[in-house]
C-alpha cells in the first residue's frame, strides 16, 4: 500500500488525488489531501467570482472526488519551514517521513507588481486583495474595502487584460442587488451596495487582439443592467490585426468582434460606465493632496513586432480614487523545496521535483507551482495526470521507502495540529447555510478564521 500526501485541495490537487485512486496499476493507494485552509476547493471557492455560479458548481465534482473512500481531506494543516516550532505546521522533510510520496499543488499565491512610482499609495491595490475580500478568504483583512471605504470612490482603474481583470471590473460595476443571491460575504455586499463607483476603466498596454480574457467573460461586461460598455474605435484601429482578423486564433477573433460591436453602440444613459482602453502602459500612480491615489499616468504605446509594444512618448492621465493591478501571478517558494524565482515554479521533470538536476524520489508537483499561472481550471487535469504517471512509474521504489508505520493523522495531531476533517468541513457548509437563511439570502460565506474553526466544531 502506498500512502500519498497531496498538498493543496484546489483543482490540481483534487485531480491528482482522483488520478491516484482511479488507476489500476497500484490499486492500494491512499491519499490525504492537505490544505492550509479549513475549507477545500482552493481558487474555485476563493478565486472564482461569486456571480459565476456555473463555474463555482464545479465544487460538486471536486466534492465527489474528496468523498472517495481512499481519499481523506485534512484542512487547517500548514506545510511550514523545516525549523518551524511544534504546533505551527509540517515541514517538507516530516511529510516525507509520514508518506511514501508528496505531491505539491500549492498554486501561485503572489501577484505581480507594476514596478512604477506611487504603487504603494493608499488606494492602489492588487486585484488579488480585492478578490480575496469579496470571496471571504480568511487571510483577507479587507480593511481597504470594508465599510464606507468605497463610498468616496467615483472612478476606478483596473490594469490588466485577463479574466481576473474582467471579474473585478464586473464586480465593481454590478449592482449589489444582482450580487445578493450569491454567497458573497455580507460585509462585502454591504460595502459594494454603498460604493460610489460610477466609472471603471479597464486598461491594457497592448491591443484588443492580444487580450488574455475569454470571450464568455468579456461578453458579460455588456450584459450588466444600467451599465454602458464603452470602447474607443480609434484605439481598436491601432491594432493591425483589428482590421483583418482572418489570421487570428478563433478566441482572439471572437474577442475583437465583441469589442467592435461595442464600439458602434450609442450610450444608453446607464448609471455606470465600463471604459475599455488599449495601448496604454502605466508609468506612475498619481497622488492627490490627501496623499491617496488620485489616478494613473499612462504612456501611449504602439505595436512593435508580432506581439510587443513600444512607448511613443505621449502620456495621458486617468483620474481614479481606486487602482487595482491585475497583471499576473507568481509562485511562492515553499521552505524545503527547490525554487526557480525567475519562473516562479519548482524545477521538475514530468512532475518529479529536481534537486541539483536529479529527480528527488517521493517529491512531485502539479498545477501552477509546476507549470506557472497559465491555462484555465480544466488545464489542471492533464497536468495532474502527467505527474501521477511519473509517481506511479516510481511506485516500486516508493514502496521501499521507510515511512511512519501508523496513521499519518495520528502523527499530525501529536505535533499539536488540529486538522479539520471532512465532517468539520460539512459543519462549515451547514453554518454558512444557516447564516444565509438568517440574512434572508442563500448560503453566505464565513469570512474569518475564528468563525470557520468554530463552525468546524473545534476540530
Image: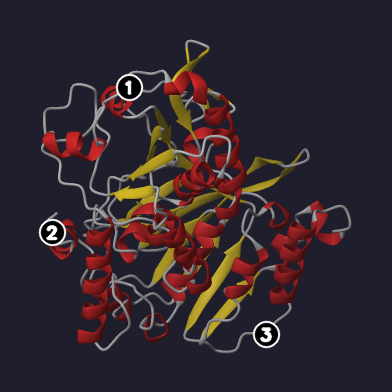
The mark found on residue 450 in the picture is 2
- The residue depicted at 70 percent of the width and 74 percent of the height is 263
The percent coordinates of residue 365 (x first, y second) are 48, 32
The percent coordinates of residue 93 (x first, y second) are 29, 22
The mark found on residue 439 in the picture is none
- Mark with earlier residue (3, 1): 3
Cβ–Cβ below 8 Å for labels 2 and 1? no
Q: How crowded is mark 2: few (under 14 residues within 10 Å), some or many (20 or more)?
A: few
Give the structural element (helix, strand or loop) at label 3: loop
Res 272 visible: yes
The percent coordinates of residue 293 (x first, y second) are 33, 56
- The residue depicted at 25 percent of the width and 76 percent of the height is 186
Give the structural element (helix, strand or loop) at label 1: loop
> On the rendered structure, is 307 left or right of 386?
right
User: The N terminus lies in which quarter of the figure?
Assistant: top left
Measure the C-alpha gap from mark 2 to mark 1.
Answer: 29 Å
The mark found on residue 266 in the picture is 3
Q: Which of marks 3 and 1 is in front?
A: 1
- Mark with earlier residue (2, 1): 1
In front: 72, or 350? 72
Above or below, 38 relative to 217: above
> On the rendered structure, is 242 left or right of 377?
right
User: The C terminus lies in which quarter of the figure?
Assistant: bottom left
The mark found on residue 336 in the picture is 1
Amino acid at each position: 500500500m502506498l500512502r500519498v500526501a497531496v498538498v493543496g485541495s484546489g483543482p490540481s490537487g483534487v485531480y491528482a488525488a482522483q488520478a491516484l485512486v482511479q488507476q489500476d496499476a497500484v490499486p492500494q493507494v491512499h491519499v490525504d489531501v492537505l490544505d492550509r485552509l479549513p475549507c477545500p476547493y482552493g481558487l474555485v471557492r476563493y478565486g472564482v467570482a461569486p456571480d459565476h455560479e456555473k463555474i463555482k458548481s464545479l465544487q460538486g465534482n471536486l466534492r465527489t472526488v474528496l468523498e472517495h473512500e481512499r481519499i481523506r481531506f485534512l484542512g487547517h494543516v500548514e506545510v511550514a519551514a523545516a525549523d518551524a516550532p511544534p504546533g505551527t505546521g509540517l515541514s517538507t522533510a516530516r511529510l516525507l517521513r509520514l508518506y511514501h510520496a508528496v505531491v505539491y499543488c500549492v498554486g501561485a499565491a503572489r501577484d505581480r507588481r507594476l514596478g512604477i512610482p506611487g504603487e504603494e499609495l493608499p488606494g492602489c491595490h492588487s486585484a488579488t486583495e480585492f478578490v480575496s475580500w469579496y470571496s471571504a478568504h480568511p487571510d483577507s483583512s479587507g480593511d481597504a474595502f470594508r465599510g464606507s471605504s468605497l463610498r468616496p470612490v467615483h472612478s476606478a482603474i483596473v490594469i490588466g487584460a485577463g479574466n481576473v481583470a474582467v471579474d473585478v471590473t464586473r464586480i465593481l460595476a454590478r449592482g449589489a442587488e444582482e450580487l445578493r443571491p450569491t454567497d458573497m460575504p455580507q460585509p462585502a455586499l454591504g460595502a459594494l451596495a454603498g460604493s460610489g463607483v460610477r466609472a471603471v476603466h479597464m486598461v491594457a498596454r497592448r491591443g484588443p487582439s492580444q487580450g488574455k480574457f475569454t470571450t464568455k467573460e468579456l461578453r458579460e461586461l455588456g450584459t450588466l443592467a444600467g451599465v454602458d460598455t464603452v470602447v474607443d474605435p480609434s484605439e481598436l484601429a491601432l491594432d493591425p490585426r483589428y482590421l483583418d482578423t482572418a489570421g487570428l486564433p478563433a478566441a482572439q477573433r471572437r474577442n475583437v468582434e465583441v469589442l467592435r460591436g461595442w464600439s458602434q453602440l450609442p450610450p444608453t444613459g446607464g448609471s455606470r460606465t465600463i471604459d475599455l482602453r488599449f495601448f496604454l502602459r502605466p508609468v506612475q500612480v498619481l497622488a492627490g493632496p490627501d496623499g491617496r491615489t488620485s489616478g494613473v499616468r499612462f504612456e501611449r504605446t504602439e505595436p512593435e513586432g508580432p506581439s510587443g509594444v513600444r512607448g511613443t512618448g505621449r502620456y495621458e492621465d486617468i483620474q481614479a480614487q481606486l487602482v487595482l493591478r491585475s497583471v499576473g501571478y507568481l509562485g511562492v517558494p515553499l521552505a524545503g523545496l527547490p525554487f526557480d524565482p525567475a519562473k516562479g515554479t519548482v524545477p521538475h521533470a514530468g512532475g518529479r521535483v529536481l534537486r541539483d538536476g536529479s529527480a528527488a524520489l517521493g517529491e512531485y508537483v502539479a498545477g501552477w507551482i509546476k507549470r506557472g499561472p497559465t491555462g484555465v481550471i480544466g488545464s489542471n487535469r492533464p497536468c495532474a495526470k502527467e505527474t501521477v504517471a511519473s509517481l506511479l512509474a516510481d511506485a516500486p521504489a516508493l514502496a521501499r521507502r521507510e515511512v511512519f508505520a501508523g496513521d499519518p493523522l495520528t502523527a499530525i495531531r501529536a505535533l499539536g495540529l488540529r486538522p479539520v476533517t471532512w465532517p468539520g468541513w460539512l459543519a462549515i457548509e451547514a453554518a454558512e447555510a444557516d447564516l444565509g437563511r438568517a440574512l434572508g439570502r442563500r448560503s453566505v460565506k464565513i469570512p474569518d478564521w475564528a468563525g470557520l474553526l468554530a463552525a468546524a466544531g473545534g476540530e
